Amino acid sequence: MLYKVLRPIEGFLLVGLGGAVCGEGEATFLVVGDENDFILEVFMDCHSERDWTRFSAPVKEGTWGKGGGVFSQKMGLPGTFYVANITPAGIGDWTDGEIFRAITTGVSKEGQALFSIMPHPYYGQVAQEDIEAVITYLRTLPAIENKVPASEVDFPMNFILNTIPQKAHLQPVPSKTDPVLYGKYLITAACADCHTMKENGQNILAMEFAGGMEFPIPTGGRVQSANLTPDKTGLGN
Ligand code: HEC
């Protein structure tokens, strides 16, 4: 599964992660600056509806950011988590700082911990300017009224959850002349979360990039993320 250009939108080039799924009916997109020298990385497919009848399940027109997807016990998760509406109708009254804190540390406007299906532990390692660009872009989305229920967290995750948010460790965007450092930056922001197994909602660091996360497909079946490490069970063969 490699990048696949889906369609240009508002001056950005949308690069879909072919075959990737995320939640019951959702997945991730990387939005790469077309002319501008920045990368917007957003979970637009987790936060939008997908068309599962088409190859790679593109986001349905008019559902950008509306949220409402469900991640539940059916997927082995400790609760029922509803994907937030991140259009201006959902978080329009949040300040930039509140959105920034939610994306990079996993704490909502109301001070509640966000479960790490929302990959804040990785987004907290991105550059401040990239997160700011994401927020700027979110403010331009058409507002879609869609009231999403509050997530219900099972015991004991309802307590453990509060220990997951961490201070962000923001870093500058590495120079593109250093492909290893720059690639590491991109993969941390865009790929690590789906390709790393989790325990109690936390990434198992020893298994970083080793794949194995399961994603049920709404139309039936499931896929597992691949092992991206150079081992022979991964990309080394
Ligand atoms: C939303 C979750 C998700 C994200 C984000 C994601 N992947 Fe994947 N990836 C998957 C899943 C699931 C598969 C397996 C798909 C299948 O088997 O059809 C996969 C498969 C792959 C494969 C195929 C390997 C093989 O052995 O078949 C590669 C390579 C890959 N991903 C690289 C990446 C890179 C690089 C990124 C970041 C730019 C990325 N992925 C982001 C979920 C994701």
Image: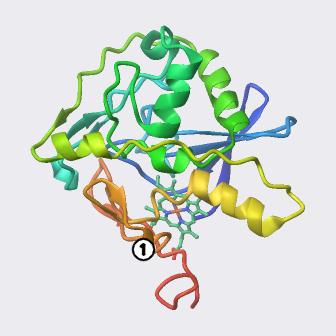
In which quadrant is the C terminus drawn? bottom right
Q: Is residue 95 left or right of residue 23?
A: right
SS at badge 1: helix
- Residue depicted at x 51% and y 91%: 232
- Residue depicted at x 58% and y 52%: 190
Q: Report if residue 69 is visible in the image.
A: yes
- Specify few, some or many for label 1: CA neighbours under 10 Å numbering under 14, 14-19, or 20 or more: some
- Residue depicted at x 30% and y 45%: 163
Picture quadrant where residue 185 is located: bottom right
Q: Is residue 168 above or below residue 62?
A: below
Q: Is residue 62 above or below residue 52?
A: above
Q: Position of residue 143 (x, y in %)?
A: 51, 11
Q: Which residue is mark 1?
A: 207
Q: Position of residue 226 (x, y in %)?
A: 46, 72
Marker count (numbered): 1
Q: Report if residue 141 is visible in the image.
A: no
Q: In the image, what residue type sits under mark 1?
A: Met
Along the viewing direction, whichever of 222 and 191 lies nearer the viewer: 191
Along the viewing direction, whichever of 196 and 158 lies nearer the viewer: 158
